[in-house]
Image: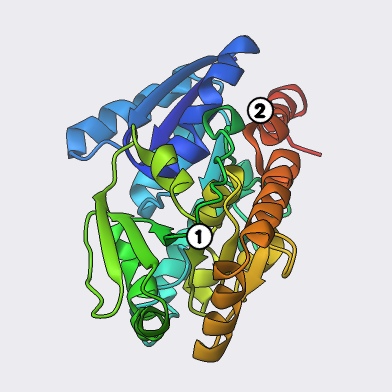
Amino acid sequence: MKILFLVQGLDVAASRYRVLQYLPYLKEQGIQVSVLPFPKSFFAKLKVFKGVKQYDILFIQRKRFPVLWLKLIRKNAKKIVYDFDDSVMFRNSKYIKHESKTRVKMFRNMINASDHVIAGNDFLQKKTAPYTHNVTIIPSPIDISFYPQKKYSENNDNITLGWIGAHGSIHYLKKMKPIFETLGKSNDKLRLKIICDTFFDCENMVVDKKQWNEKDEVADIQSFDIGLMPLMDDPWSHGKCGLKILQCLATGVPVVCSRAGINREIVEDGVHGFWADTHEEWIEKLEILINDHELRKKMGMAGRERVIGHYSLKANAPIMLNIFQQLIQNGTVK
């Protein structure tokens, strides 16, 4: 079996977690894999889209194509698998109006042209259902072998609240600034650690600013005492697949997160962390964990077990393989 994966980029987090980390497993199963970033120029697209006929399956990560390109792809591809982990049919959270007829149309065309669809969570699966029943939910999994459990220090002198993400998502965290200011006024041992490529400051809390890099990513997350995952309750946020939460829980770091989207699916309130929406809830739930070292450890360890059982690469790679095998053997996935 030969599969061509078209991805957003070889250094893009979504590509790493949705595609690239599966490749060693697929190769072990005898599958020949090729990976290309999306071609940009007209002639590069023409060459790639004509060349897909030499593969048994074309796997497209997230991108939607205009109709003419999509027709060329469909003409040449034997089987198409479309994978997405965001609410690509909506505008993002920065827009007041989230609905977009153009986005919906391009999404519908992409789904209709695909033989099977992989959605990152239940919300995305439901948005796909009107156009096809050939859809499987696969989360953005964690290769637990790269995420050793953090060492829980008994030294409570400093407590680090941590957030990791891309610059396009930091606006979620920045909205929490009044919460950090309130907490910082009453506890000078708190620190906020931001792993990103853009940052902000707080008056009452020290902010550790760390440029993201793949080599330090896991160690940086292990340095958190409490992970943060604020979201807005809107269609774009509901499409998020909770990678920040999964990364924290994988290392044994408990989280406090918004009661929105996949956060509620991953985190059981009071077991792996807490849900919080209002200013008062965030203060209350964070203070519980700030003041209880043993509870942080207990919730973190429970979260790690949850990731291993449901959100690990080991648990999800066979599901991906089964999709490919059924498509080739049966022409569809049952």
Q: Mark 2 or mark 1: which comes first in sequence?
A: 1
User: Where does the image place residue 220, in percent across and percent down from the top left?
Assistant: 39, 44
Left/right placement of residue 190 relative to residue 207 reads: right
Q: Residue at x 41, y 83 (%)?
A: 186
- Placement of 281 over or under 129, stated as above or below: below
Vertical position of residue 252 compared to residue 265: above or below: above
Considering the numbered disc 1 on the image, is that residue within a helix, a strand or a loop?
strand
Q: Quadrant of residue 207?
A: bottom left
- Specify the label residue 184 is tagged with: none
Name above or below for residue 206 compared with residue 125: below
The residue at the point 52 percent across, 60 percent down is: 226
Crowd band around label 1 with a 10 angstrom C-alpha radius: few (<14), some (14–19), many (20+): many
Q: CA distance from mark 2 to mark 1?
A: 35 Å
In the drawing, what numbered circle is on residue 227? 1
User: Could you say which is closer to the camera, residue 201 or residue 9?
Assistant: 201
Work out whether residue 93 or residue 198 is closer to the camera in this orientation and state it. 198
Quadrant for the N terminus, please: top right
Residue 21 in the image: state x and y as whole percent: 50, 29
Residue of label 2: 324
- The reply to whether discs 2 and 1 touch (Cβ–Cβ < 8 Å) is no
Q: Quadrant of the C terminus?
A: top right
The amino acid beneath tag 2 is: Phe
